Amino acid sequence: MKPVTEIANLRILISKYNHAYYTENASEVSDEQYDALMNRLLFLEREYPDLKSEFSPTVRVGSVPLASFSSVLHEAPMLSLSNVFSQEDFISFNNRIVSDLDTEQIAYSVEPKLDGVSLSLVYRDSMLVQAATRGDGVRGEDVTSNARTIRSIPLKLHTDESINVEIRGEVFFMTKNFQKMNLGKKEAGESVFANPRNATSGSLRQLDSSVTASRPLSFMAYATGFYPAGILNQNQLLKKFHEWGFVVNPKNKICTTTEQVIEAYDELVEVRSNLPMEIDGMVIKLNDFSLRDKIGSLARAPKWATAWKFHAEEMSTALIGIEVQVGRTGRLTPVARLEPVQVGGVVVTNATLHNQEEIIRKDVRVGDIVLVRRAGDVIPEVVKSLPSEVSTRGQLFSMPDKCPVCNGPVAQPDGEINLYCINPSCSARLQRSLEHWASRKSLDIDGLGEKLCGQLVNSGMVKTIADLYNLEFHALTNMERMGELKVTKLFSALEKSKTVSLSRFLTGLGIPGVGEVVSRDIAGRFMGLEALGAATEEELIAIKGVGHVIATSIIGFFSSPITSEVIQQLVNVGFDPVEEEKRIGKILAGETIVFTGSLQIPRQKAKELAQMAGGKVTGSITGKTTMLVIGENVGSKLGKAKTLGVKIVSENDFIELVSKEQRRIK
Ligand code: IVH
């Protein structure tokens, strides 16, 4: 056989096997047979260089490296897509189309939004002559040699006609190919790719196309630069792509009602994690091309299509390390350090692993590719490890038996899965406590951020939150990045914080179990710190949201020598927190008060004082009573009040309270 004939035959045969394997998912020959044919063709092309061709399947292994990419002008700009994030957004997108077209008879092509890199492929006379990345939409980079190595991109369209067309689609990794490739890299001691998208863009933008050839990339077609003659809608176009030898997403669908579109979206959300590739939403396109032309495009995106993005996005990335953070309560939390990845529109570099039990349950190990989830504003979490060969995986992480910050002892309270650093002066705990004290929901202290809290703790200037109020001006101005103006502002913010309401003060203290909501409920029942500090478990449990555990926690906090000392110091520097609404003039508003026992002041006077402060006074204890003021020699009312969970206040506290009110009114 003449070399020219043998070469031609081999090319036809190998292309046929390629198509069957990469596009139709059907293997017609064994790997050995395929390799033998390919090697024979490579040999002949080396022997007869004149017979080389850019359309030979041997280009799939890559060609001579380039010095740089040249830039190419797209025949028609490569637009991007507008986004919608909810059903309502989609309905308004649809309403706009309905009103522009003046018809409700609308068909959409809905397609999974592949999370890869878009690519333009120019075919002349049905032959692939140019491939370019999107670039800025107008000009892209010429990556023709690289695109030729991607097996699912036909070098020649499967047609006898001579077709000129620019086909657009997505280059991406099938998840299983991505995992296999990363495994190979790991075994070779190379660094792994963080996620399929990064790997795609890195693989496509290689000057040496043999590198691209070694990466198992895929391609799916979904659009053209100009609509080919005779093709009237997206559905026909996608069918044509398949005929021409492209892979088309089998999940693409035509929907003729908004309900069907919503159903298609819900279904995609459901099956998303089981799909063979990563997707980040659903593209909704008007099916009919003539209607698209009526609607038109804006500068960057068409008005006839949109991308309905997923909400709580899950993305894969590499787990590069696990660190243990020590929280305000001393709780040790394992935190995953991740190769940066965009999740739900935000770059994520850390995610919580919760605790040892979760690490074991999810079998997450350093070096794994993990799935990271972010839903709304919550802290990102590692959902799971994506499968990989067990033999090459790292050791299972174990939590330390000492605090990683202060090296102090850790303990696991009965019935808890979490470990705690029990050293109350651990610098990590202290820093987190300061950050919490200064945070917006607590005392909202401007200028006291994470960094400064760290500096204050590390310099030894602050050992408790109360120390913040005894700082020396000059000691601060000597610190890094702390000019006089900044320190002055900080001092005034600290001074202002002394007028905080009781509920925010309580939130700021960070008593275990006492967050914003419980703080507010507690502050609604007690006049001030002194009353709260003297509260019994019974009184506390009577408050909505407070059970035995929280009540014990509060009592423990006010009776522990260390924490009660801090509260005393805060009072000494001028804190006297009461609840906001009481502060503004009606300290006893909403209270139904009963007096009992012999009072030092005349009863009538006491009654007037209570009423002036907004309270209502009655003679006997009923279900409506909220406060019992007690003098000397109290009788049965006290017992009754206790059983009803009524707040009990001494006459002195009462006088103190209402006189405070009088001072405020003045
Ligand atoms: S059509 C003018 N269809 O999403 C419309 N795009 O932000 C052109 N994408 O750059 C795009 N899957 O990379 C279309 N089925 C699909 C898609 C898809 C993924 C990407 C594409 C584009 C981006 C839009």
Image: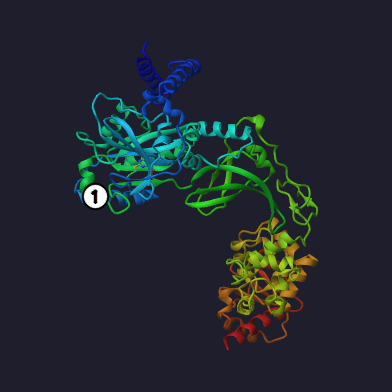
At 24% across and 39% down in the image, what residue appears? 227
Residue at which label 1 appears: 296
Total marks placed:
1
Where the N terminus falls, by quadrant?
top left
**Circle 1: residue type:** Gly
Residue 247, given in percent of the width and then of the height, sits at 37, 30
At 57% across and 86% down in the image, what residue appears? 665
Q: Is residue 665 above or below residue 251?
A: below
Which image quarter: residue 614? bottom right
Secondary structure under the numbered disc 1 in the rendered image:
loop
Where the C terminus falls, by quadrant?
bottom right
| Residue reaching furthest to the top | 1
Q: Is residue 17 above or below residue 237?
A: above
Q: Is residue 58 above or below residue 526?
A: above
Q: Quadrant of ligand 1?
A: top left
Q: Is residue 395 above or below residue 507?
A: above
Of residues 163 and 429, the one drawn nearer to the viewer in this rendering: 163
Give the class, few, some or many, for how many residues have Cα within 10 Å of label 1's Cα (few <14, many ≥20). Answer: few
Residue 532, given in percent of the width and then of the height, sits at 69, 69
Which image quarter: residue 659? bottom right
Specify whether 445 is left or right of 566. left
Of residues 661 and 507, the one drawn nearer to the viewer in this rendering: 507
Residue 640 visible in the shown view: no
| Residue reaching furthest to the bottom | 666
Which image quarter: residue 492? bottom right
Residue 664 visible in the shown view: yes
At 60% across and 69% down in the image, what residue appears? 524
Residue 207, given in percent of the width and then of the height, sits at 47, 40
Specify whether 380 is left or right of 498. left
